[in-house]
Image (cartoon, grey):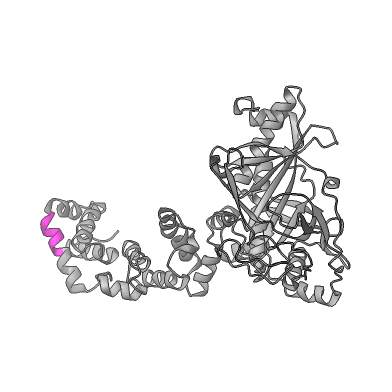
Amino acid sequence: MTVTELVPYEEALAAFDPVMGLEVHVELGTKTKMFCGCATTPGAEPNSQTCPTCLGLPGSLPVVNEIGVESAIRIGLALRCEIAEWCRFARKNYFYPDMPKNFQTSQYDEPIAYDGHLDVQLEDGEVFRVGIERAHMEEDTGKSTHIGGAAGRIHGASHSLIDYNRAGIPLIEIVTKPIVGAGARAPEVARAYVAELRELIRSLGVSEARMELGQLRCDVNLSLRPHGRETFGTRSETKNVNSLRSVERAVRFEIQRHAGVLSDGGTVVQETRHFHEENGTTTSGRVKEEAEDYRYFPEPDLVPLAPAREWVEKLRAELPELPLARRNRLREEWGISAHEMQSALNAGAVDLIVATVEAGADAAAARKWWLGELARRANERGVELAGLPIAPAQVARVAALVAEGSLNDKLARQVIDGVLEGEGEPDEVVEKRGLRIVSDEGALGAAVDEAIAANQAVADKVRGGKVAAAGALVGAVMKATRGQADAARARELILERLGVSGG
């Protein structure tokens, strides 16, 4: 189907009810792989972090990574899941170059965590509950690099290169229950769910969950059913969507595409699809296999897992405050709206603001600098806020200098410039650049006298009762002092010199 055959979004929702299922793969931040001792260091020479076990060589035997199991339990608990008293691994058989063993060690019908939920907050503050079907452990595949094809795709490629360093890295796959009732907000719900899940994973410290690095990947399952019908429609699965914006766009596109097929009397094909970042469309991949096509059977080389209840309860007691609860608490403390908190979250600024407040800044000032000037600088440099070379303690010091009257906002921005350029701490930048506000009565008084002498017509207006005209004289003082005058004190002196009450 081409883009021109898409049904307009509003028309699609008028006729059909979308049903979603989201499968999120989280790459754990363990030092070694899931079933062997190979390192997981990013950026290593291709195929340098492999061994007989993760390459599937005859006679090699796997051993379960304890930290990987612990991470899975922590994720399951944070998702309000039941933790299995007994579970085991299975072999998922398929033949493809990225799996050197020709099977993936995963969990099938006996996952370690099941039947949970995650509450997500939408832009307007509405909370939507997403049911969790399961969270299970498995291993990642190798990485294929296709040479000669368009946009790195296998189609049209002359050959492919395989790096098995990633093969065997621990993954947790989190599968939702069917998400119904979202209606026209389905794309927003999908994005909010993945965003909230990413925040939760990061809060647990089990993964950095950076989507741009493939540490968190989402498969978007979507189907449509006519309003009033209980039976689900045939689903498509858009694979490996790797940004929040793309998750939202993939859901919207597939709703329109499915509606176009069904409205024309066609049949939706159950298949995997590729998402294209450049235009927000999807294209067909392969006809989707069913579970039986993978010939699952219990992994004979690994014993079943039976997490001790004492261990599970210990991990439950150690869970941090979960992201949504934390944001709601901070929102109350900071006195801001749900929308304002969402803006801070979208900017990746919540933790930075918290750290800045802990360093002594007022919450309003911390929000102002991170969401204003620093967000602009991050955008100019094409980095995330946390990637800027300035620490929360330094932002707190800039805010303190403004609060005590040593700097105004214009000078503070120059101090931030200096810190970002590596010129030292804020106080050092102030001294090196000579940025402190001119509040010395002698120097400031001289600048005021010069401004009045050079602008007699304006001064006469002020004497005549047009106090607002004093702004032009303040501007002249600020220009003469390169923006370093105390503007409020300069205005007071101007009115004193002209014998006018401040009014």
Q: Quadrant of residue 60?
A: bottom right
Q: Which residue lies furthest to the top in this view?
A: 264
What kind of secondary structure does the magenta stretch mostly adopt? helix
Q: Residue at x 84, y 56 (%)?
A: 108
Q: What stretch is highlighted in magenta?
A: 449-455
Apparent side of residue 283 relative to residue 173 in the rendered image (left or right): left
> Vertical placement of 56 versus 123: above or below?
below
Q: Determine if the magenta segment contains residue 151.
A: no
User: x and y percent of residue 120 in the render?
Assistant: 69, 54
Q: In which quarter of the image is residue 230?
A: top right
User: x and y percent of residue 310 in the render?
Assistant: 84, 77
Q: In which quarter of the image is residue 426?
A: bottom left
Apparent side of residue 363 relative to residue 316 in the rendered image (left or right): left
Q: Quadrant of the N terminus?
A: top right
Q: Quadrant of the C terminus?
A: bottom left
User: x and y percent of residue 482 in the render?
Assistant: 22, 62
> Vertical placement of 364 versus 99: above or below?
below
> Vertical placement of 122 versus 330: above or below?
above
Q: Determine if the magenta segment contains residue 454.
A: yes
Q: Residue at x 77, y 36 (%)?
A: 270
